[in-house]
């Protein structure tokens, strides 16, 4: 079984119109090697209002990412061993919430399905999703949140893989 989990949570407070820090990252966990599946998998970040409404198209920045495989030698078991081993990640370095309110970021794991005759060009199917913590977004600058030790370790993995990690604002 493949499981998607938020690996780096956004801070609990953010400023409207400014990139969220720390940047959101998600991990793909599996008990088996899923390398061959990764070409048809991607993730999408969506803004969810505290009312439960998904605000499609409202989240700024890079809102989708293809799977980045983690080599077996650098993947590590998660704290929940029943979920499996880190096999890949998705990274959203510059997400921006445009207006004040209370929101979370939903990261959805998508897979292309070409098996239906009704959709010969394929259809995207949601395989899993995970929601971030709630974020209070205001108009004024807020105290910057820092990634915890586990999140810092995960961000270093991404940096070693060539991702640019923004510094704290």
Image: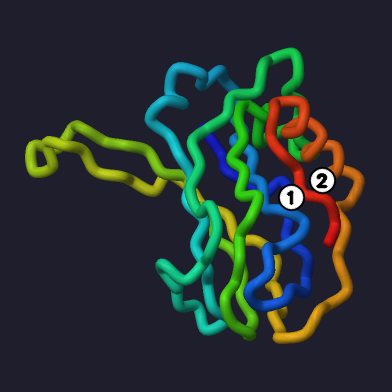
Residue that protrudes farthest toward the left in the picture: 117
Residue 47 place in picture, x, y as percent:
52, 68
Quarter of the image where one finds residue 162: top right
Q: Are marks 2 and 1 in contact (CB under 8 Å)?
A: yes
Secondary structure beneath disc 1? Answer: strand
Residue 64 place in picture, x, y as percent:
48, 48
**Residue at left 60%, top 30%?**
88
Mark nearer the N terminus (2 vs 1): 1
- Which mark, by number, is residue 8? 1
Relative placement, left or right, of 28 versus 140 is: left
Q: How many marks?
A: 2
Quarter of the image where one finds residue 16: bottom right
- Which mark, by number, is residue 151? 2
**Residue at left 67%, top 16%?**
71
* Quarter that holds the C terminus: bottom right
- Where 136 sits versus 2, above or below? below
- Which colour assignment does the render follow? rainbow
């Amino acid at each position: 079984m493949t499981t998607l989990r938020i690996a780096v949570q956004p801070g609990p407070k953010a400023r409207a119109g400014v990139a969220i820090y720390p940047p959101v990252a998600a991990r793909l966990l599996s008990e088996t090697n899923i390398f061959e599946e990764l070409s048809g998998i991607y993730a999408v970040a969506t803004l969810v209002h505290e009312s439960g409404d998904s605000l499609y198209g409202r989240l700024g920045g890079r809102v989708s990412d293809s799977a980045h495989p983690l080599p077996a030698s650098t993947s590590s078991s998660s704290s929940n061993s029943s979920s499996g081993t880190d096999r890949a990640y998705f990274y959203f370095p510059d997400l921006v919430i445009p207006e004040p309110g209370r929101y979370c970021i939903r990261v959805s794991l998508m897979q292309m399905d070409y098996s239906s005759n009704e959709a010969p060009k394929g259809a995207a199917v949601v395989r899993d999703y995970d929601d971030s913590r709630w974020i209070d977004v205001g108009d004024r600058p807020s105290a910057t949140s820092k990634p915890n030790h586990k999140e810092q370790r995960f961000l270093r993995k991404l940096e070693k893989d060539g991702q640019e990690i923004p510094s704290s604002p």
